[in-house]
């Protein structure tokens, strides 16, 4: 489906981003991976993905809190592939604390990685998409881009910002057949979710698995956690012909969380 296309997926060394990179490569797209982690493990992921799907896969360790490194990331992807057709902004972090105790550098990092980096990658990639008169931009929102929870105020603020930025991008870019949408997942089984759930369960002196089941079934109408493959499948839909008129919107993959 995506032969001849080139994609940049931020935050693709783990969790949702890694599944999206795999899915795009599986459809024949070239992929620029990005994110942190153990160098040998990342090289193993990169080379195995390239081999299994017979596509070019590159990796950049650019830190998305630094705008000059984001410029380097986009330049490297364009040099490697000739252009960029698909941009998935997926990198993320989570910090949980009350507003009046929230670390200031935590707020700065949250806004930088989720929101400012999305602005930077988009502004740098748009000229290449406009030139080819085709583009798919998918921003990783969250149920927290639509509703709030306590102790996640900077995350909620950043994700609401991502949803607003998604709408503005869609309106500006539509004339070039470029779509921009935000996927808003509920709880997805990833290292980020596990870390967060473990921390909260330990804090409350609870069994981790029991805590996860209770948290998920309290928020989701479908009382189960979501898989990374379900989010990757939604990205593929948005990149497919069937999704070509979907733009400027949020796609909730949240088990019914925001239906209430
Ligand atoms: P994860 O921790 O498994 O992956 C996060 C990725 O972002 C990693 O590759 C990490 O290296 C990268 N990253 C973090 N800081 C970075 C930086 N400064 N520069 C470059 N890369 C950086 O997390 P995940 O759960 O897969 O989350 C992916 C996205 O999905 C995030 O935007 C998150 O907010 C969103 N999301 C997750 C859930 C969930 O329940 N897991 C729910 C809704 C939304």
Image (tube, rainbow, N blue to C red):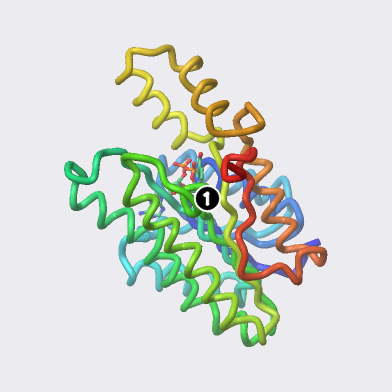
Dot 1 surroundings within 10 Å: few (below 14), some, or many (20 or more)? Answer: many
Ligand 1 within 8 angstroms of badge 1 C-beta? yes
Q: Which residue is drawn at 61% across and 64% down?
A: 181
Q: Which residue is drawn at 40% across and 30% down?
A: 195
> Position of 235 compared to 257: left or right?
right
Indicate the quadrant containing the C terminus: top left, top right, bottom left or bottom right. Answer: top right
Location of residue 169 with respect to 73 vertically, above or below: below
Location of residue 157 with respect to 253 vertically, above or below: below
Q: Nearer the viewer, residue 110 or 134?
A: 110
Q: Residue 113's x, y, as percent?
A: 37, 57
Indicate the quadrant containing the N terminus: top left, top right, bottom left or bottom right. Answer: bottom right
Q: Residue 115's x, y, as percent?
A: 40, 63
Q: Which residue is drawn at 42% across and 46% down?
A: 148
> Position of 154 compared to 260: left or right?
left
The reply to whether residue 17 is visible in this rendering is yes
Direction front: furthest residue: 260
Q: Residue at x 61, y 76 (%)?
A: 83
Quarter of the image holding residue 27?
Answer: bottom right
> Position of 196 compared to 46: left or right?
left
Q: Residue 62's x, y, as percent?
A: 39, 60
Q: Residue 38's x, y, as percent?
A: 41, 40
Q: Residue at label 1?
A: 12
Q: Is mark 1 on a helix, strand or loop?
A: loop
Location of residue 259 with respect to 2 vertically, above or below: above
The reply to whether residue 45 is visible in this rendering is no
């Amino acid at each position: 489906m995506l032969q001849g296309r080139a994609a940049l997926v931020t935050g693709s060394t783990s969790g949702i981003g890694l599944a999206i990179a795999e899915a795009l490569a599986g459809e024949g797209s070239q992929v620029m991976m990005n994110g942190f982690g153990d160098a040998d493990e990342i090289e193993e992921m990169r080379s195995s993905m390239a081999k299994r799907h017979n596509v070019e896969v590159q990796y950049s360790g650019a830190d998305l809190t630094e705008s000059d490194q984001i410029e380097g990331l986009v330049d490297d992807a364009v040099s490697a592939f000739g252009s960029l057709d698909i941009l998935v902004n997926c990198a993320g972090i989570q910090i949980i604390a009350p507003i009046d105790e929230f670390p200031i550098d935590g707020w700065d990092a949250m806004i930088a990685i989720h929101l400012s980096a999305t602005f930077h990658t988009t502004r740098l990639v748009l000229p290449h998409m406009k030139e080819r008169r085709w583009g798919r931009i998918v921003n990783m929102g969250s149920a927290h881009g639509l509703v709030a929870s306590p102790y996640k105020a900077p995350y909620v603020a950043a994700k609401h910002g991502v949803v607003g930025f998604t709408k503005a991008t869609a309106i500006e870019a539509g004339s070039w057949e470029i779509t921009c949408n935000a996927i808003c997942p509920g709880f997805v089984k990833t290292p980020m979710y596990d870390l967060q759930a473990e921390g909260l369960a330990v804090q409350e002196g609870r069994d981790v698995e029991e805590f996860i089941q209770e948290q998920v079934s309290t928020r989701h109408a479908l009382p189960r956690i979501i898989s990374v493959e379900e989010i990757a499948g939604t990205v593929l839909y948005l990149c497919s012909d069937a999704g070509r008129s979907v733009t400027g919107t949020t796609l909730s993959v949240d088990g019914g969380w925001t239906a209430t």
